Image (spheres, rainbow, N blue to C red):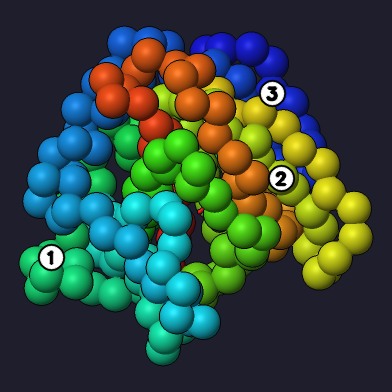
Amino acid sequence: MGEAPVFLRGVEIRPGYLDRAAQEEMVEDIRDVARAAPLFSPETRFGKKMSVQMTSAGTYGWYSDRRGYRYERRHPSGVDWPPIPASVLAVWHAVTGVERAPDCCLVNFYREGARMGLHQDRDEADFGWPVLSISLGDSALFRIGSVERGGKTESVWLNSGDVCVIGGEARLVHHGIDRIRAGSSTLLADGGRINLTLRVVD
Ligand code: SIN
Ligand code: MN
């Protein structure tokens, strides 16, 4: 589906992997997740509120506060995280080819002005498993650096329906979102961007 894959610093990008109908179905599934486990803005370990709102589906949810970055078994309200929607699991299996299901689907919601600083995904036990990212809604400028800190970075716009695999040699690359192009997609009625990242946690 979509166009041929593009590789940037070892990250595989599949432009337009999800067609509009598949994107709409997935948004409905994510709305159900957010109804069961409402979006919240975590604090970084430095005590600063993140501009991105988050929730999760799966056995574990990603969480952050002054105690640091980690996975938690429950939403801050005390409820279990809802199951990862079948529509999302299907993309994980089809794109990664991995038989094991992910334990966590982190849902990031970006309004205009939200961003995510350069970081590595390294709260998981085994970096042999890939991370899969799915973009829905407004386009985002995705910056990719190296596994090491510092040095040159390169950027690419991620559009609605694009899917990325952060795996293999690129599993620990630094990455982040510089900005959202508000109004670039009609997928979400009130605008903004949803990013899903799927991880095997333990
Ligand atoms: C993340 O690194 O958790 C999110 C990346 C993105 O929003 O594309
Ligand atoms: Mn990340």
**Are the two marked residues, 2 and 1, in contact with CB atoms closer than 8 angstroms?**
no
Q: Residue 27: give x, y in percent of width and height.
A: 27, 28
| Residue type (three-letter) at the residue carrying disc 1 | Asp
- Nearer the observer, 29 or 44: 44
At 40% from the left edge and 73% from the top edge, which residue is drawn? Answer: 43
Q: Residue 42: give x, y in percent of width and height.
A: 36, 67
**Are the two marked residues, 2 and 3, in contact with CB atoms closer than 8 angstroms?**
no
Residue annotated with mark 1: 80
Tell me if mark 2 has few (under 14), some (14-19) or many (20+) residues whose alpha carbon lies within 10 angstroms of its own: many
Mark 2 → mark 1, Cα distance in angstroms: 33 Å
- Residue 195 seen in this snapshot: no
| Residue type (three-letter) at the residue carrying disc 2 | Arg
Residue annotated with mark 3: 5
* Residue 143: image tag: 2
- Closer to the chain start, of discs 2 and 1, is 1
Q: Secondary structure at mark 3?
A: loop
Q: Secondary structure at mark 2?
A: strand
Query: Which of pointers 2 and 3 indicates the residue nearer the eye?
Result: 2
